[in-house]
Image (cartoon, rainbow, N blue to C red):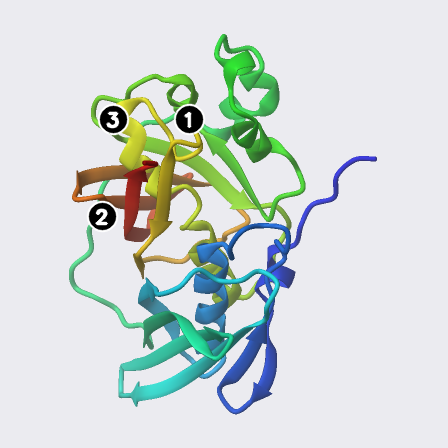
């Protein structure tokens, strides 16, 4: 039977447990730990449900403990500020009565600014050039690891189409710049809050792997131990998470068992919609 698409809106959804208290679940019960992007997306949704008339413009968070996919996630929101232009919320996620994640999110009512600029979108072929059909024509195809081929399976909440396929079979990217097209696998409701939470979820997908681009290695080869330590994100302009977006990633530094990854996210027309930064633990197995 053909595999069905997974609705990201359902994965992110929360149940209210009282004032500023929410309950979420992880769909990946069979995995070792909860996907960090899920916790970011659900925490952002929890914060958004306590703010009216304003959209988030940034988030800053820390992963404190690995999440257990078999245990519900409890999100508690603290209302720190509601000013004339900005609102601030703090969200903590707990399991087993311990905090596993902490996030600060800032909201802005929106206004017309005097200054307006953005970086240019990288010159990268469109997502149609990186379908499974096109991928199968490349000489590297037979050597691709199974986890990369899984990017193209339909039963994923986010479709991913990597551009630099050769790096998964040992090709070194000299400048360390990587690119990936992505979009939610199913159509999402016309709610900007949901699209922001969906992009927050997707922003954690393989971002830290940018640390390995210069070495012709990936985080998936079994010799690397990795984990996200923190995550920051800024939302610049309106977008739809169910349209194709280009994730342009780089790693300006790696040292002391840690690597820093940065990303810019563009619409197909070149509009810069979000920026991301993340540091993670990246070590070789002993």
Mark 1 highlights which residue?
Answer: 163
Question: Which image quarter holds the C terminus?
Answer: top left
**Mark 2 surroundings within 10 Å by alpha-carbon count, few (fewer than 14), some (14 through 19), many (20 or more):** few
Can residue 122 be seen at all in this image of the molecule?
no
- Residue at 67% x, 42% y is 155
Of the image marks 2 and 3, the number of the one nearer the N terminus: 2
Label 1 CA crowd tier, 10 Å (few <14, some 14–19, many 20+): many
Query: Which comes sooner in the sequence, label 1 or label 2?
Result: 2
Observer-nearest of 6 and 143: 143
Sequence order check, earlier mark of 3 and 1: 1
Nearer the viewer's eye, disc 1 or disc 2? Answer: 1
Q: Do tag 2 and tag 3 residues touch (Cβ < 8 Å)?
A: no
* Rendering coords of residue 97 (x, y %): 48, 80
Asked whether disc 1 touches disc 2, contact meaning CB atoms under 8 Å apart, the reply is no
Residue name at image x 54 percent, y 51 percent: 32
Q: Residue 54: x and y, percent?
A: 39, 77
Measured as percent of width and height from the top left, residue 53 is found at: 43, 80
Q: Give the residue at the far top of this rendering.
A: 139
Question: What quarter of the picture does the N terminus occupy?
Answer: top right
Q: Secondary structure at mark 1?
A: loop
Q: Residues within 10 Å of mark 3 (few under 14, many from 20)?
A: some
Instruction: Please give the label number shown on residue 118.
Output: 2
Label 3 sits on residue: 214
Q: Nearer the viewer, mark 2 or mark 3?
A: 3
Query: Between residues 207 and 47, which one lies in front from this camera angle?
Result: 207
Q: Quick check: 33 above or below 265?
A: below
Q: Quarter of the image holding residue 175? A: top left
Position of 69 with respect to 59 (left or right) is right
Q: Secondary structure at mark 2?
A: loop
């Amino acid at each position: 039977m053909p595999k069905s698409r997974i609705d990201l809106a359902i994965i992110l959804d929360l149940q209210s447990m009282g004032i500023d208290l929410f309950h979420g679940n992880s769909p990946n019960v069979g995995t070792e730990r909860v996907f960090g992007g899920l916790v970011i997306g659900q925490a952002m949704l929890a914060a958004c449900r306590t703010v009216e008339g304003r959209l988030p413009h940034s988030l800053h968070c820390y992963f404190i403990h690995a999440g257990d996919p078999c245990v519900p996630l409890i999100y508690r929101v603290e209302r720190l500020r509601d000013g004339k232009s900005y609102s601030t919320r703090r969200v903590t996620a707990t399991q087993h009565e311990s905090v596993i994640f902490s996030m600060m999110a800032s909201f802005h009512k929106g206004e017309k600014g005097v200054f307006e600029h953005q970086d240019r979108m990288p010159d990268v072929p469109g997502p149609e050039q990186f379908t499974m059909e096109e991928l199968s024509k490349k000489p590297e195809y037979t050597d691709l690891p199974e986890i990369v081929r899984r990017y193209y399976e339909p039963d994923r909440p986010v479709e991913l189409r990597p551009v630099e396929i050769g790096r998964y079979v040992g090709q070194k990217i000299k400048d360390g710049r990587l690119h990936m097209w992505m979009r939610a696998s199913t159509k999402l409701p016309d709610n900007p809050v949901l699209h922001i939470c969906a992009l927050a979820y997707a922003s954690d997908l393989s971002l830290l792997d940018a640390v390995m681009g210069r070495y012709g290695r990936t985080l998936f080869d079994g010799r690397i131990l990795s984990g996200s330590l923190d995550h920051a994100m800024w939302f610049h302009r309106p977008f739809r998470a169910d349209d194709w977006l280009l994730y342009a990633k780089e790693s300006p530094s790696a040292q002391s068992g840690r690597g820093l990854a940065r990303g810019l996210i563009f619409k197909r027309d070149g509009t810069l919609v979000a920026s991301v930064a993340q540091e993670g633990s990246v070590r070789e197995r002993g």
